[in-house]
Amino acid sequence: METFYRNLLENNKKWVAENLEKDPDFFNRLKNGQQPPLLWIGCSDSRVPANEIIGANPGEVFVHRNIANMVIHTDMSMLSVLDYAVNVLKVKHIIVCGHYGCGGVQAAMTNSHIGLIDNWIRHIKDVYRFHQDELNAITEEKLRFDRFVELNVIEQVMDLAKTSIIQEAWKAGQSVHVHGWVYDIKDGLVNDLDITIKNNESLGAVYQLDL
């Protein structure tokens, strides 16, 4: 473990040297602030690094990650990130990115008791309940798991659109597009779920806030 820890520090020095060799002004530009066009809401899984997946440089992606890329309206951490990204950084795109093989989604398909995380996974179970007819009709477990991952992303995209943060931005004429992706760890490719929301007209009337 000590060797692993020391290697982290050495890798940092190498990373700095490599970036300065390619661009002497690399860190000078970053220190002056950030204006990323994109907010990424992804899973905490260590195999799904936001910047690397899309080839983005430091300063180009504002990132929030949690178990199973959830958008929960009582999660002050997520809401704070969202508020800052939309109202201060003025991001133009928000991507909710799940991934096939997600452990949180898989756990939500079972009755296993894990611990404290059970309270978080219950929100994912709610997604299963919303779509149980479609999911239960899929007899092959792997296909059902993959579809559950996709449906979870779609629900989180819709939940983003339901927030007052996003709806107030739209009301003010701000351009914010919310997208849903699923990353495939086995080949590194993104599956664009072809869901993009840019106003609250896609929501049921009860969710359209009178701002």
Image: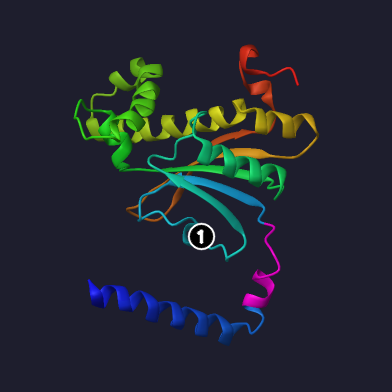
Instruction: Judge left or right: residue 175 versus residue 60.
Output: right
- The residue nearer to you, when weighing 125 against 152, is 125
Q: Please rate how many residues cluster around mark 1, counting C-alpha atoms within 10 Å: few if below 14, some from 14 to 19, many from 20.
A: some
Q: Quadrant of the N terminus?
A: bottom left
- Rendered position, 80 above or below 61: above
Count of labels in the image: 1
Instruction: Judge left or right: residue 191 versus residue 206.
Output: left
Figure quadrant of residue 70: top left
Q: Is residue 198 magenta?
A: no
Q: Is residue 31 magenta?
A: yes
Residue indicated by mark 1: 51
Please state which amino acid type lies under the numbered disc 1: Asn
Segment colored magenta: 27-35
Question: Is residue 20 at all visible to an observer of this figure?
Answer: yes
- The residue nearer to you, when weighing 31 against 172, is 31
Q: Residue furthest right?
A: 173
Q: Where residue 155 appears, x then y in whole percent?
A: 48, 28
Q: Where residue 77 appears, x then y in whole percent?
A: 51, 41
User: In the image, what residue occupies the spot 54% across and 33% down?
Assistant: 157
Instruction: Judge left or right: residue 161 versus residue 132.
Output: right
Q: Where residue 136 appears, x then y in whole percent?
A: 28, 19
